[in-house]
Image (cartoon, helix red, strand yellow):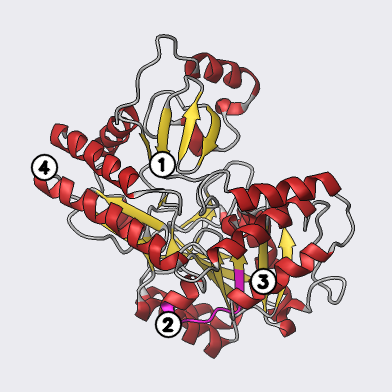
Amino acid sequence: MTATPSTSDRNLPLFERARAVIPGGVNSPVRAFRAVGGTPRFVERAQGAYFWDANGQRFIDYIGSWGPMILGHGHPAVLEAVQKAAVDGFSFGAPTEREIELAEEIIRLVPSIEMVRLVSSGTEAGMSAIRLARGATGRKTIVKFEGCYHGHADALLVKAGSGLATFGHPTSAGVPPEVAQHTLVLEYNNVAALEAAFAAHGAEIACVMVEPIAGNMNFVRASQPFAQAMRDLCTRHGALLVFDEVMSGLRVGLGSAQKVLGVRPDITVLGKVIGGGMPLAAFGASRAIMEHLAPLGAVYQAGTLSGNPVATACGLATLKEIGRPGFFEALGARTRSLVDGLTAAAADAGVPFVGDCEGGMFGFFLLDRLPQNYAEVMTTDGARFNRLFHGLLDRGVYIAPALYEAGFVSAAHSDVDIAETVAAAREVFASL
């Protein structure tokens, strides 16, 4: 269960080399372990539910590349599809039949989508969805919610001030205030704030953008009244409802979070699972909305690597596997067994703990009840979480190196993996 320490830790010198040539030593900030302290693990290889670091130590992986590896690492069918596609060519900059096949499969699985545009990242898809919403409505203002992350596009890197409905100001250097002035930031799961925003600005709002199951303040799901209020208010005021399902799409179920909630968005943003681990994302909507995009309409969007032939092969093979009968029932049961096991282990140790999950996505908080918004998430015990993180890491279990990130279970995780994880957690909880 416990990872065997190496006599010579190769992760530290690798991190030192990386910091000399890459800002912070990483190509995405959360990987730097700044939130939890310590040295990041540099991955050498992965297979199934595990990865091995530079020391050759094995870890049970509950990140799964932050969601895409729903089948686990190195699934034979996906690997075969990628290898065959790579032989034919890495990139063409021209249409392929596989792009059509992937688009058709996405449309089949997500009923709110009638047409789809493939891109290379969730940030690109989210940014394009907002431009499309503004172009289709002729309006400027967008609504987002504190704690929801939609990529690092300028207009979305904002936070709220005081009050129920406050226009945001930038949270990143390099984002001019003028760019953020049309972004209205509200509290997640707050129907009153949403109603107030539409009462004051309804005629100006192009879209409401939301993670229907938020995975960037750990795991917080939209309440049914909140989801329905978003739908009703957008319809009433002529705004578009945008579901950012980069993380939850085809991860919490075949119909995604919109099926779980029973609410149909106008635009859906997808990523992660649809690429199977390759750089691929998408945004889709009704035919009437999507036909505003160039070359049919006036909303411009383009990408050299969009619809990449190797990435589409990876995505198609992944979607074929997760579409098999019983896949999500088994995945959901495995994820629930993990959350229930962790909850019981924490309770036995007298540690405040609450968890939630849907499909292969889960989260937990060192609190007495599930938080409903970002402010409540922020009340969790960060110092205790850091000790939990490192305790699990020392025992060969790798969870997100940050308090505010969801976790992921794959089809490759076995009952033995779950049992080992819970046993490791039980030891760590006893020390907290």
Q: Secondary structure at mark 1?
A: loop
Report the mark closest to the observer, 4 or 2. 4
Most common secondary structure along the magenta stretch = loop
Q: Count residues near mark 4 (Cα–Cα under 10 Å), then give few for <14, some for 14-19, many for 20+.
A: some
Question: Which residue is the site of mark 2?
Answer: 229
> Is 283 above or below relative to 422?
below
- 2 or 3: tag closer to the N-terminus: 3
Q: Position of residue 86 (x, y in %)?
A: 79, 45
**Image quarter in which the N terminus is found:** top left
Where disc 3 sits, the SS reads: helix
Name the residue tied to disc 1: 400
Which kind of residue does numbered mark 2 sit on?
Ala
Query: Callout 4: helix, strand or loop?
Result: helix
Residue type of the residue flagged with mark 4: Ala
Looking at the picture, which amino acid does disc 1 mark? Ala
CB under 8 Å between callouts 4 and 2?
no
Q: Nearer the viewer, mark 3 or mark 1?
A: 3
Distance of label 3 from label 1 (alpha carbons)? 30 Å
The part of the chain drawn in magenta is: 261-268
- The CA span between labels 2 and 3 is 30 Å
Q: What residue did someone put label 3 on?
A: 105
Identity of the residue drawn at 53% across and 90% down: 236
Question: Which residue does the image show at 60% across and 34% down from the upper left?
Answer: 27
The kind of residue on which mark 3 rests is Glu
- Relative height, residue 284 to residue 128 (above, below): below
Query: For the residues marked 4 and 3, what is the alpha-carbon distance in whole angstroms?
Result: 46 Å
Among the two numbered marks 1 and 4 on one chain, the one whose residue lies closer to the N terminus: 4
Q: Residues within 10 Å of mark 2 (few under 14, many from 20)?
A: some
Q: Which residue is mark 4?
A: 349
Picture coordinates of residue 202, whole percent (x, y): 54, 82
